[in-house]
Image (cartoon, coloured by chain):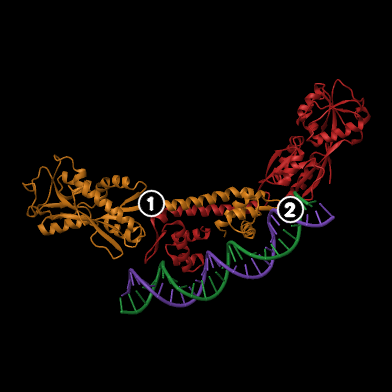
Chain colours: A orange, B red, C green, D purple
Amino acid sequence: MASLRQLEYFSAVADAGSLRKAAQRLGVTQPTLTVQLRALEEILGVVLFERTRNATLLTPAGRELLPEALALLSQWRNIVESAHLISSHSHSTYRLGVPQTLGPYLLPSLLPTLHQRFQRLRLHVREEVPDMLLKGLEEGQFDIVIGPIASVPDSIVREPLFREPLFLASPVDMEVAPHTNVAESDLSGLEILAVDERHTLRREVERICERTGARLNSDYEGTSLDTLRQMVVMGMGLAFLPALYVRSEIHRPEELRVQPLQGGKLFREHAFLYRRHAPSRHFYQELQSQIREVITRDLSDTVIPLG
Amino acid sequence: MASLRQLEYFSAVADAGSLRKAAQRLGVTQPTLTVQLRALEEILGVVLFERTRNATLLTPAGRELLPEALALLSQWRNIVESAHLISSHSHSTYRLGVPQTLGPYLLPSLLPTLHQRFQRLRLHVREEVPDMLLKGLEEGQFDIVIGPIASVPDSIVREPLFREPLFLASPVDMEVAPHTNVAESDLSGLEILAVDERHTLRREVERICERTGARLNSDYEGTSLDTLRQMVVMGMGLAFLPALYVRSEIHRPEELRVQPLQGGKLFREHAFLYRRHAPSRHFYQELQSQIREVITRDLSDTVIPLG
DNA sequence: CAAACATATAGAAAAAAACTATCGCTAAAT
DNA sequence: ATTTAGCGATAGTTTTTTTCTATATGTTTG
């Protein structure tokens, strides 16, 4: 196998038309070129140069291979150059994992600001169920994860981002509680819909159902908060919807009543996660602090910043 | 500067997801990869892999650079492959030099057969004045030359190819000699036209003019046999035209009378030339013998094969 | 808590690359 | 005709790079 250096020698000698001149230009001695060119010719199985007394000329074969060698060298320089660009970290593509119940309602607030701050940064967003987010992060399918993940192994850094209240959604023709705030006692015996078990959201809802005596309806096994909302509108039950979803998707009060819970005890907490030893961890920290800023600035009417 | 091997290591480790596995696959030991990858990372200024307990994963930067590295490796393999193709010699492009007074009339007979014999051979034909042909060959602008070159330095091999008679061309309304064959004595006092002094043809004509007492007219300074023919038709003088030109371009006997010279003493001789130490010299020999065959087979009614 | 399995490291050995000195050859200058 | 200058090739040595062996370090798993 040849080396890039040999190709440089090839190019330099072809250019200079003489081993000695090329050697001088390259800052090596002439025997080096003699030997290395012979080695390259050996590898390629082709004589590249015709050594005459006056000059060292390309053979027809050398003439044909030279442009290819030059192209390869130029491609190499490109690689080095883009590596140096990438080394600033904010010029890479990172794979971000988020749950389906958060991504569509959080990211539209985040991405424009991040894009503005890190012009050349690209985030490859993939939605996944929380368990899979953590697994995927550990196994390297994701570089960073934002989601409602409570506990992580040592190899993962978890930084709490914000607390997202859950709102009770009920049909307009049904009055759960007369006040704006719903008390936990109001829930007793009610029929509750929720997304499937793979979601943290489901577990939160299970807990409050147990506490209040509400009944968790298992008719729906899905992932879409939109579907859940439709089911509530159709009178199939009540549901707890996260604040960012409500903020972003509930615009018609005549269709659905959305009420906070008294005491603010019903919520989920989202964290920012990455592998502890990821080489880009410092950049992830920086990303994280930008995200915190955006949340505090633009979303603190909806969620409670943490950490 | 990195080596292609380091890029192979990069690719193999990315593929295997583990230094050990990759090392085994590559037939080297694991520390080799540790060291070489670190060196590559150093060169690129970028961390390519995240070394975890379970595996060695690409970093975002590594993920972006991998395709480029693979492309470079594939380009390298292409170079090696085309080099091996070219090494058969008949897959290259050779630069052939010929005089303007020969090329257009000889090559159409040669090239189809050569192309048939060496499918992937390409000849880059350039026309040049004989002196320049020899100079260009010595200096490497040409790889092979076919032309009327009589003597060459030691560094050039000259192989006589064929003898090409010259015919006397005269206007139909002027009778130089009553017979088919013109005797030298018939030429005395006649006005002769010729191409310019840089051509061997001119020198041949000068010689015969001196010998026979014909007068060489210097009104025309050009290179084109076609122009010379037109001038004869217009009655501006006589001219000596080479056999291959006559064979290929003189189709209208009512316009121009073309007569051989008695004794066959007026001719020019073409040779096949190449640099003695050219790495492809063996192929040139083979080319030459093919050319001889074609001449003997297709042109021996017009020229006299030599050598 | 040890076994298994990953990468990292240190130091020796091997291989490759580059250097110095010199040769042989040709071409141009004397 | 001989010398001289300039070219690439070669031999042998030195330096640098690469690879190896052996071992360390750390993490996960049973």
Residue that carries the numbered disc 2 in the rendered image: B277
Q: Is A16 located above or below residue A42 in the figure?
A: above
| Residue contact at pointers 2 and 1, CB within 8 angstroms | no
Residue A74 can be seen, yes or no: yes
Spot occupied by residue B57 in the image (x, y as percentages of width and height): 39, 60
Residue that carries the numbered disc 1 in the rendered image: A92
Chain of the residue where label 2 is placed in the rendered structure: B
Spot occupied by residue A140 in the image (x, y as percentages of width and height): 36, 59
Category of crowding for the residue at label 2, using alpha-carbon neighbours closer than 10 angstroms: few (below 14), some (14–19), many (at least 20): some
Category of crowding for the residue at label 1, using alpha-carbon neighbours closer than 10 angstroms: few (below 14), some (14–19), many (at least 20): many
- Amino acid on which disc 2 is placed: His
* Identity of the residue furthest to the right in this view: B185
Q: What residue sits 32% from the left and 46% below the top?
A: A115
Q: Is B200 located above or below residue A139 in the figure?
A: above
- Which SS class for mark 1? loop
Left or right: where A85 falls relative to B133: left
Chain of the residue where label 1 is placed in the rendered structure: A
- Amino acid on which disc 1 is placed: Ser
Left or right: where B125 falls relative to B237: left
Residue B251 can be seen, yes or no: no
